[in-house]
Image: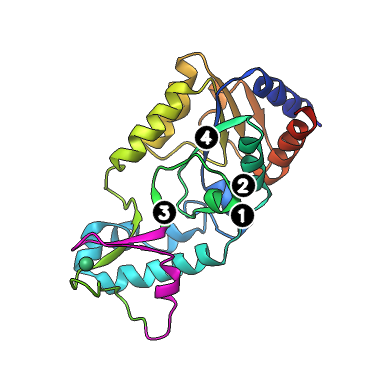
Amino acid sequence: MNSSLQSALQLLEASSHAIAFTGAGISVASGIPDFRSPGGVWERHDPMEVATTRALKSNPEGVWRFLLEAFSLTTKAQPNRAHTALARMEHAGVLHGIITQNIDALHMRAGSRNVVEYHGTMARCVCMGCGQTFNEPEKIVFSKGFTIPWICDQCGGLVRPEIVFFGESIPLDALEKSGQLAREADLVMVIGTSGNVAPANTIPYEIKSRGGKVIVINPQETSYAGMADVTIRQPAETALPELAKAFSHHH
Ligand SMILES: [Zn+2]
């Protein structure tokens, strides 16, 4: 174990309410590319044309064509070693919860329980007309005879995934739950996120400003470099299993 991992381990051992704050980087090893990376989805699609409520209303077919691509990515993806390591750390009592910016539901599928999906989830859809919700939407959107856009069979309204589109505000319950997790936290592991997406990116600063410790796990440079107590320049799927293993020995 290298020295930055050892320092991280010491901080985790000294903490009483550690949380994780995760972004796209943790799911890359699951086959979901970072949409914001060079050559990524947002270079091929204009988010204003495929990921806003205005686009959904004016061009529902176009938005749903894009959503089907997104569903095929998230449906095929499996949790990787980073997701399962975080789930193990939660079960071992080391990790209090996760605030994720990801919409792929991979933390839940890995067995993590206390997860705030800050930008919503692709694992549930909702009718914009009657509010009916649909779990396991992939079973419907990939069923035979499905045509885009998804129209509600009850009211004829448009159905959309429960994700936060560009320009939409963060759902109140996600804000409340993440706020509570952050207030209780005395340590945050910032994993696979560059820190460029507001307002989620302020969460590590909140914790730091109250005296909490910050561990950054990212092979790339992040905007948190100046405030990190420990930086581990490794992919999450390399670093986290090592940390989780250390705790399974200790406890
Ligand atoms: Zn409806």
Residue 8 position in % (x across, y down): 68, 25
Determine which quarter of the picture holds residue 82.
top right
Residue nearest the viewer, comparing 180 with 63: 180
Relative to 76, 165 lies left or right: left
Determine which quarter of the picture holds residue 160.
bottom left
Residue at (52% x, 59% y) in the render: 39
Label located before the other in sequence (1 or 3): 1
Residue 197 position in % (x across, y down): 41, 40
Amino acid type shown at disc 1: Pro
Q: CA distance from mark 1 to mark 3?
A: 15 Å
Give the SS element for disc 4.
Answer: strand
Label located before the other in sequence (2 or 3): 2
Q: CA distance from mark 3 to mark 4?
A: 17 Å
Crowding at dot 3, Cα within 10 Å, few <14 / some 14-19 / many 20+, comes out as some
Amino acid type shown at disc 4: Gly
Question: For mark 3, what is the residue?
Answer: 121
Crowding at dot 1, Cα within 10 Å, few <14 / some 14-19 / many 20+, comes out as many
Per the rendered image, the range of residues in magenta is 123-145
